[in-house]
Amino acid sequence: MNASAPRLRLTSAAAALCALAATLSLLACSTGPAANAGVPVGASPNFDPYPSDGSPGVVPYFEWVDDTHFTMDTWVSRAQCGSGAPTVVAESATELHIHYAITDRDAICDASEYNVAYEFELPEEATGRPLQITVTAEDLKHVDHGTLE
């Protein structure tokens, strides 16, 4: 007797359901943007990298949107070419760390500097004030610091 594996025959409707299930499974596994990622927003009118009084500009610049959201304005060159949206984590009740991770190592970058701004949701653990903020970027030794009053 010649035994062979049973054959499974799918109707077009069953095949469509299988394809849909596979797609939904992939979507469910996709992480998408990090929950703590900054969302690009328009620049703050209060950000002035070249103050008229001759004092050095403050980069990055932080300000409150409301009780649970804040923005960061900075130069795109500081955001590290090829990086994704920066993410924020609470290091303690009064310290935040914003980090740019490289997501595109083949990015073509220009040398121009221009303002970029991100809005972040304040991590629940960050309950103290003022908040000391450290900004780092993957593969970049420079570290920026700021304060959110």
Image (tube, helix red, strand yellow):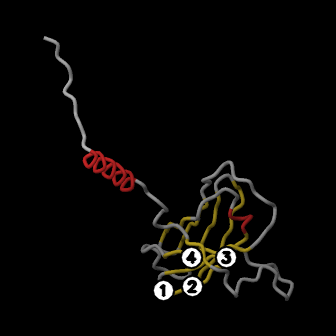
Residue 41: x and y, percent? 61, 77
* Amino acid beneath label 3: Asp
Alpha carbons under labels 2 and 1: distance apart: 7 Å
**Nearest to the observer: residue 127 or residue 137:** 137
Horizontally, is 48 left or right of 149 in the view?
right
Q: CA distance from mark 3 to mark 2?
A: 12 Å
Q: Position of residue 142 (x, y in %)?
A: 72, 60
Find out whether the residues at labels 2 and 1 contact each other: C-beta distance under 8 Å.
yes
Q: CA distance from mark 2 to mark 4?
A: 9 Å
Q: Residue 117 falls in which quadrant of the image?
A: bottom right
- Amino acid on which disc 1 is placed: Asp
Q: Earlier in the sequence, mark 4 or mark 1?
A: 1
Numbered label attached to residue 119: 4
Query: Are dots 2 and 4 in contact, CB under 8 Å?
Result: no
Residue identifier under label 1: 67
Identify the mark nearer the N-term, 3 or 4.
Answer: 3
